[in-house]
């Protein structure tokens, strides 16, 4: 369960306040994987970061009764001067999991090889995404926050990412930001549409996709 109580978030852009989340009061259902949809700039990644506790809200709170991952596509969570392996060790200690087992998993899954032991600042965006995805899949969370990461890498790595994510979804749920409706339909049960600071829940995924596509077309 994830519950938002009077959640507000805005940014100042060129001297004007732009609301991203506007007085959100909503309880998300337990055990469902949700597609988080909305136009570019609607605030989807911002909302994921607030749920994860990375970004503070201006007002209100987020409550949960389970464990939540960091946004998988968010590379800013890594210390750039530390190696990938050192970052993994740090996360393992924070979450109380076996350090060497987690490193072994990430090394095998990410396919970074010796680059896992190089500073993260030397990584490309794709390498950071591989590290982040492998690290998050190596720890059990009740809810995974995913930001387009299953589309990272070549076809082989992409297929492997989708397979392990599908395996994790047998016991966990997710909130997924994606512009690929095929991926949304593969992994999600229901949908959320973020528009002008308002978040609407749709139990029927196809209704959420239809509402999202009408926004994209400018018909709503």
Image (cartoon, helix red, strand yellow):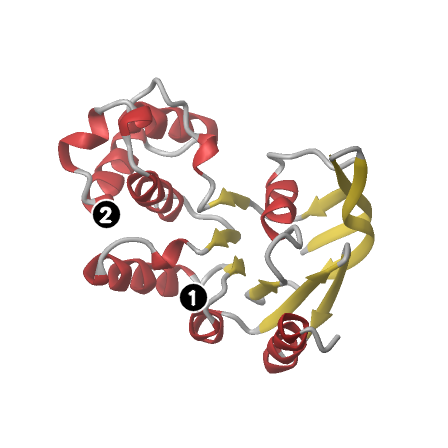
Q: Residue at x 46, y 61 (%)?
A: 171
- Residue 103 placement (x, y as % from top left): 26, 34
Q: Nearer the viewer, residue 106 or 8?
A: 8
Image quadrant assignment for residue 46: top right
Q: Does residue 144 sit above or below 214 in this rendering?
A: above
Instruction: Label 2: state its secondary structure.
Output: helix
- Seen from the viewer's position, the closer of residues 24 and 18 is 18
Q: Could you tell me which secondary element the residue under label 1 belongs to?
A: loop
204 relative position to 57: left or right: left
Q: Is residue 48 left or right of residue 69?
A: right
Q: Is residue 179 visible?
A: yes
Q: Position of 214 compared to 137: left or right?
A: right
Res. 211 mark: none
Can you give x and y, in whole percent of width and height, for residue 45 in the image?
58, 48
Quadrant where the C terminus is found in the figure: bottom right
Look at 57% across and 65% down and name the residue there.
35
How many callouts does the rendering have? 2
Find disc 1 in the rendering and name its residue. Answer: 170
Q: Residue at x 25, y 42 (%)?
A: 105
Q: Is 55 rendered above or below residue 72?
A: above
Return the disc, 1 or 2, that comes first in the chain's sequence. Answer: 2
Give the residue pinned by disc 2: 109
Residue pushed farthest left?
114
Q: CA distance from mark 1 to mark 2?
A: 19 Å
């Amino acid at each position: 369960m994830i519950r938002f109580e009077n959640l507000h978030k805005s940014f100042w852009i060129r001297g004007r306040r732009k609301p991203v989340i506007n007085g959100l009061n909503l309880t998300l259902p337990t055990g469902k994987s949700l597609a988080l949809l909305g136009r570019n700039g609607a605030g989807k990644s911002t909302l994921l970061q607030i749920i994860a506790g990375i970004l503070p809200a201006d007002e209100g709170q987020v409550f949960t009764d389970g464990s939540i991952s960091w946004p998988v596509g968010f590379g800013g969570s890594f210390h750039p001067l530390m190696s990938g392996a050192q970052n993994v060790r740090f996360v393992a200690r924070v979450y109380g999991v076996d350090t060497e087992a987690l490193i072994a998993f990430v090394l095998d899954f990410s396919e970074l090889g010796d680059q896992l032991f190089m500073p993260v600042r030397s990584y490309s965006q794709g390498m950071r995404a591989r590290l982040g995805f492998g690290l998050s899949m190596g720890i059990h969370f009740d809810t995974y926050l995913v930001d387009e990461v299953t589309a990272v890498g070549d076809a082989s790595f992409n297929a492997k990412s989708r397979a392990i994510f599908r395996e994790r979804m047998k016991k966990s749920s997710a909130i997924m930001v994606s512009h690929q409706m095929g991926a949304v339909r593969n992994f999600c049960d229901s949908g959320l549409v973020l528009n002008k600071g308002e978040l609407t829940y749709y139990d029927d995924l196809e209704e959420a996709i239809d509402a999202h596509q009408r926004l994209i077309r400018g018909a709503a």
